[in-house]
Amino acid sequence: MNGIQKQLREIAKEAYLKDLDTDDETELEPNFLRIIELVKDEKEEGMRFFCDVIWGRIDHPYSLLPFCTRDLRWKEIKEEAMKRYEEKKPNPRLMKWMSDISHAFDDKVWEDADFWPHFRRKELA
């Protein structure tokens, strides 16, 4: 495993553990922004990481994918998530998960923008 993948996995794990310990999901935002910063110019590495997240090979908070999908807008994230959804359906939990990813990718103004300070500044200011 290379250095970027190791860093991404460590950040995801830190966010996952923080998520288990907090009632305020916005505390995870700095972790998500660090992930975005690491992958924004390293799409291949980013997609390796997100594929591992999508297929459940990395512990992560539920909100990691919608948040990162919204900022990066990589169609490959949505496409890979759809592959998992199609393979596992019918599954009510995955229906919600896929819906959240689709809204994050497709909405002109993200329905969850007001929840996250980062997106509140970007989309609602």
Image: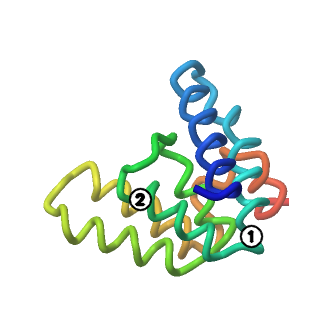
Determine which residue is flagged by label 2. 54
- Label disc, if present, on residue 40 of the rendered structure: 1
The amino acid sitting under disc 1 is: Lys
Q: How far apart are marks 1 and 2 (CA)?
A: 18 Å
Residue at 65% x, 68% y: name it: 109
Point out residue 106 in the picture as x, y percentages from the top left corner: 54, 76
- Pick whichever, 72 or 4, lies toward us: 4
Judge from the rendering whether residue 107 lies leftward or rightward of residue 122; answer left or right. Answer: left
Q: Relative to 60, is 103 above or below?
A: below
- Mark 1: secondary structure: loop
Point out residue 115 in the picture as x, y percentages from the top left corner: 66, 44
Mark 2 nearby-residue class (10 Å; few <14, some 14–19, many ≥20): some
Q: Relative to 79, is 119 above or below?
A: above
Residue at 50% x, 66% y: name it: 103
Residue at 56% x, 50% y: name it: 64
- Mark 2: secondary structure: helix
Q: Quadrant of the N terminus?
A: bottom right
Point out residue 100 in the picture as x, y percentages from the top left corner: 45, 58
Judge from the rendering whether residue 73 lies leftward or rightward of residue 87; answer left or right. Answer: right
